[in-house]
């Protein structure tokens, strides 16, 4: 790898400059010029995730390393397209009954696993059933709760739901719901056999995974690298150096403090993608004082969101409005007034609640999200002006999710977001949901949630989702101060999607199949 | 010689007892950590139902002593069980990582031990000269900086600025020995810098200590050259403390290198242990800790045997 860079007139820059000129001259859009990426090459990437305890068991995939790997080596019935819509994958097409309760997915003909074994309806059913049922230890078990039964009809898989759900095809895009070979009563995940664009050559948990392009992939329009080496490099410094010294072609989880310095190198591309990932401070609405709506509003007005985006995210993000819907989502409420830092308003709400002052404890650890403890301290300072004494209870990273989150009445939380509104509301804000960390139960919200789910008319759905965001903003138990961008970097000569998918980190975690060498 | 063999036998027996105690301590320590494997694996996504199901499937719902005895009954016949998460055999999970650690430790030791003993002899010979001062200041500086910091400095100068060596030591596929030595040169160098000072200064101190003895004075008076005085007369009597400190440092090279592993992305056993503790994967934690404990026990034993063998008075007791 050479570092000399005499002039910025490299072959690639020259080509893209002249291509842009040609495009302007002939009126062709640049995106059309990118239509056929070059095939070949070995792509090396360093991810800031991955543990020696990682396994290919789809029930417990848990980090970015496994997410990227899962989308690379596994096949799915459906996928999230770059523009955020749902696209066919192993399911060629689907149709819903009028009440959106019965969904029929027609399987693509002639698809096989990497081992050459044809993918059958039985494999698909076993793969989904693996996450459901009594003994399931799957992290997506709650997501699949709406399914009543799964059956087969020739080459079609039939899902029957308890109640109508217009967004059901999105549910099946989840990285855990991979289609793997059925075996006996269950599935065989140990073999590492999958149906994705890349097949696993060697998987060393916590170290690396090597993959090769699957020659018989059903979609010839994806998977451009011949070989991919994905390394787990947890140390921030090591990751950054690996990119700068040319050892790898891309890295994720950049150090936001020093991104500015990295951007000075002309051969590196820093990508910042606004998505649905957000940080929240969840208040338990069934415990005092948070059970009082005015106390919740007081706290919502006592947090300086702009300052948090600037100091915690270093500008790589945007302010949140106490609901979990990202700006890029279909039904984001564009007319909802932004809750702003206003100590007087906070005091007013305290008075409404019959309080002169308020003293609360916020539990935080960096395990919740990177910078959570600092964010809590900023909150403490901004709340002081509103007469709120907010104590920061720093708890250990270890065991944070089992011992602090949902146990302490006020705690910091990370949410990766979901591609559709219904999924996000259902898992974290519906009454009784397993991960409803604010223990919130709003009758109108719950009613709208069920109605919107089965509603197929887009305008009516929009109206309902907008109202739900407004309810969360005024009544909800979660303070959502910021949405964090996905920030990652690629080295010279790497062609990425443009724009990026925003449903997940690293181009929707489908970088393996979407990126290529220039 | 019989006595020596008996000593080795006794020490090995004691060592086994120590390992047993260590295994109890490790087990209780893992038990005392907040949360268990099911909660750690499922993390934020845990629900009461899935946690309960996972506990039942892995047998974590049974009482702690029962689980310990079950593990112990396997361990005494050499079966360390399976990783609770991946289901992989513990021996399979550990062997490659442990051999990586041993390789790196051996690489560093092969460089560090001769250099530090030679340096130690030279600074003893040239004590209180400029060379002595410079060598002391340099080695003390390197031992006083945290090893990850040394690692970053090495990366900055030898990788980022000059591009001589790769910044990450992670191996992909099969590589030749030459390639291995090249890729892991920086982590080995970081370890060398960390352990050299200790061994060098102990060599220097042990030799200088002896230089005041009457028999050294005698040697000098009969006209032996200063180098010969040190190598032939002082060094043989200084071996015992030197061997002890070398053994300690070798043990450190095997058990204490997790920071260097992380900085250079080297897949050794340290990172495996850290991950296993974070996920409460008891079988792996136990095996790693026992390996570490055994390393210390064996190297200490080797040091004692070494000092007996180099000391005629201990070798031939009256």
Image (cartoon, coloured by chain):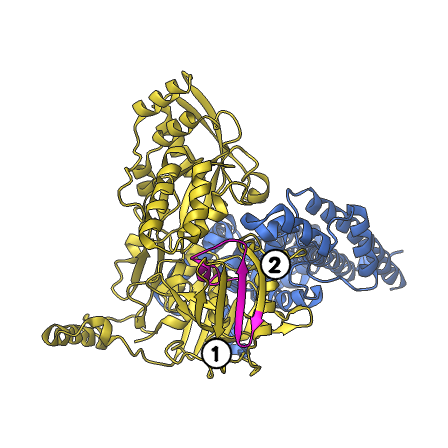
Q: Determine whether label 2 and label 1 are within 8 Å by CB.
A: no
Question: Label for residue A132?
Answer: 2
Residue B113's spot in the image, x, y percent? 60, 63
Q: Is residue A34 above or below residue A46?
A: below
Circle 1 residue: A212
Q: Secondary structure at mark 2?
A: loop
Residue B75's spot in the image, x, y percent? 80, 60
Query: What residue range appears in magenta?
Result: A152-177
Q: Which chain is blue?
A: B
Which chain letter matches label 2?
A
Please tell me which of labels 2 and 1 falls first in the chain.
Answer: 2
Between A29 and A245, the residue placed more toward the observer is: A29
Image quadrant in which you'd find residue B199: bottom right
Extreme residue in the front direction: A98
Residue A268 located within the stretch drawn in magenta:
no
Q: Is residue A339 above or below residue B253?
A: above
Q: Is residue B22 left or right of residue B44?
A: right
**Which quadrant: the N terminus of chain B?**
bottom right
Residue A507's spot in the image, x, y percent? 37, 63
Which chain letter matches label 1?
A
Q: Is residue A26 above or below residue A56?
A: below
Q: Which chain is yellow?
A: A
Specify whether residue B226 is in view: no
Q: Residues within 10 Å of mark 2 (few under 14, many from 20)?
A: some
Please report the residue visible at 22 percent of the width from the left and 74 percent of the height from the top: A10
Specify whether residue B43 is in view: yes
């Amino acid at each position: 790898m050479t570092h000399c860079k005499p002039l910025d007139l490299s072959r690639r820059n020259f080509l893209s400059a002249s291509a842009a000129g040609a495009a302007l001259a002939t009126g062709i859009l640049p995106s059309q010029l990118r239509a056929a990426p070059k095939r070949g090459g070995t792509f090396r990437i360093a991810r800031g995730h991955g543990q020696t305890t990682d396994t290919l068991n789809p029930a417990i995939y848990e980090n970015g390393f496994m997410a990227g790997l899962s989308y690379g080596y596994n096949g799915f019935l459906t996928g999230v397209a770059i523009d955020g819509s749902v696209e066919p994958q192993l399911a060629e097409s689907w149709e819903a009954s009028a009440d959106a309760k019965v969904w029929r997915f027609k399987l693509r003909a002639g698809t096989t696993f990497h081992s050459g074994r044809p993918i059958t309806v039985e494999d698909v059913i076993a793969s989904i059933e693996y996450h459901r049922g009594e003994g399931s230890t799957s992290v997506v078990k709650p997501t699949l709760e709406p399914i009543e039964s799964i059956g087969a009809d020739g080459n079609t898989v039939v899902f029957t739901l308890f109640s109508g759900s217009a967004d059901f095809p999105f549910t099946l895009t989840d990285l855990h719901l991979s289609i793997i070979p059925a075996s006996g009563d269950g599935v065989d995940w140990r073999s590492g056999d999958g149906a994705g664009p890349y097949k696993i050559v060697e998987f060393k948990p916590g170290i690396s995974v090597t993959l090769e392009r699957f020659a018989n992939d059903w979609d010839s329009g994806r998977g451009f690298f011949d070989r991919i080496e994905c390394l787990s490099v947890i140390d921030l410094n090591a990751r950054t150096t690996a990119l700068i010294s040319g050892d790898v072609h891309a890295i994720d989880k950049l150090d936001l403090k020093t991104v500015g310095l990295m951007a000075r190198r002309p051969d590196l591309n820093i990508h910042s993608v606004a998505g649905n990932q957000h940080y929240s401070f969840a208040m338990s609405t069934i415990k005092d004082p948070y059970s009082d709506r005015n106390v919740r509003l007081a706290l919502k007005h006592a947090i300086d969101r702009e300052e948090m985006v600037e100091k915690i995210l270093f500008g790589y993000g945007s302010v949140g409005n106490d609901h979990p819907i990202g700006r890029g989502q279909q039904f984001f409420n564009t007319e909802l007034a932004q809750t702003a830092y206003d100590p007087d308003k906070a005091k007013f709400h305290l008075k409404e609640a019959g309080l002169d002052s308020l003293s609360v404890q916020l539990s935080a650890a960096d395990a919740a999200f990177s910078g959570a403890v600092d964010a809590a301290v900023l909150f403490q300072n901004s709340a002081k002006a509103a007469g709120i004494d907010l104590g920061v209870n720093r708890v250990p990273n270890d065991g944070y999710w089992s011992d602090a989150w949902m146990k302490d009445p006020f705690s910091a939380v990370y949410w990766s977001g979901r591609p559709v509104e219904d999924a996000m509301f259902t898992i974290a804000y519906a009454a009784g949901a397993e991960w409803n960390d604010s223990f919130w139960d709003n009758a109108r919200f719950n009613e709208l949630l069920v109605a919107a789910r089965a509603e197929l008319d887009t305008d009516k759905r929009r109206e309902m989702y907008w109202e739900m965001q407004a309810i969360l903003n005024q009544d909800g138990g979660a303070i959502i101060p910021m949405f964090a961008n996905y920030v990652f970097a690629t080295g010279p000569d790497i062609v990425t999607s443009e724009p990026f998918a925003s449903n997940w980190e690293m181009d929707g975690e489908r970088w393996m199949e979407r990126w290529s060498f220039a | 010689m019989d006595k020596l063999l008996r000593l080795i036998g006794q020490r090995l027996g004691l060592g086994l007892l120590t390992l047993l105690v260590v295994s109890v301590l490790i087990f209780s320590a893992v038990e005392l950590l907040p949360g268990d494997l099911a909660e750690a694996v499922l993390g934020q996504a845990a629900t009461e139902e899935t946690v309960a199901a996972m506990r039942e499937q892995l047998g974590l719902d049974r009482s702690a002593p029962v689980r310990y005895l079950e593990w112990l009954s396997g361990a005494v016949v050499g079966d360390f069980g399976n990783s609770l998460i991946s289901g992989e055999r513990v021996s399979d999970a550990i062997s490659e990582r442990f051999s990586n650690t041993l390789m790196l430790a051996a690489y560093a030791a092969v460089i560090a031990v001769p250099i530090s003993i030679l340096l130690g002899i030279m600074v003893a010979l040239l004590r209180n000269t400029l060379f002595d001062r410079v060598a002391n200041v340099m080695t003390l500086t390197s031992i006083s900086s945290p090893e990850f910091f040394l690692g970053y400095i090495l990366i900055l100068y030898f990788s980022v600025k000059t591009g001589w060596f790769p910044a990450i030591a992670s191996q992909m596929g099969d590589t030749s020995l030459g390639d291995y030595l090249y890729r892991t040169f920086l982590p080995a160098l970081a370890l060398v810098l960390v352990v050299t000072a200790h061994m060098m200064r102990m060599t220097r101190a042990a030799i200088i200590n002896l230089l005041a003895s009457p028999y050294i004075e005698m040697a000098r008076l009969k006209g032996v050259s200063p180098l010969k005085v040190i190598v032939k007369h002082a060094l043989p009597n200084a071996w015992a403390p030197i061997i002890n400190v070398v053994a300690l440092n070798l043990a450190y090279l095997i058990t204490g290198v997790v920071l260097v592993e992380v900085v250079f992305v080297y897949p050794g056993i340290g990172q495996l242990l850290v991950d296993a503790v974070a996920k409460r994967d008891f079988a792996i934690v136990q095996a790693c800790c026992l390996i570490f404990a055994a390393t210390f026990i064996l190297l200490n034993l080797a040091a004692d045997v070494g000092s007996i063998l180099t000391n005629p008075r201990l070798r031939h007791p009256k």
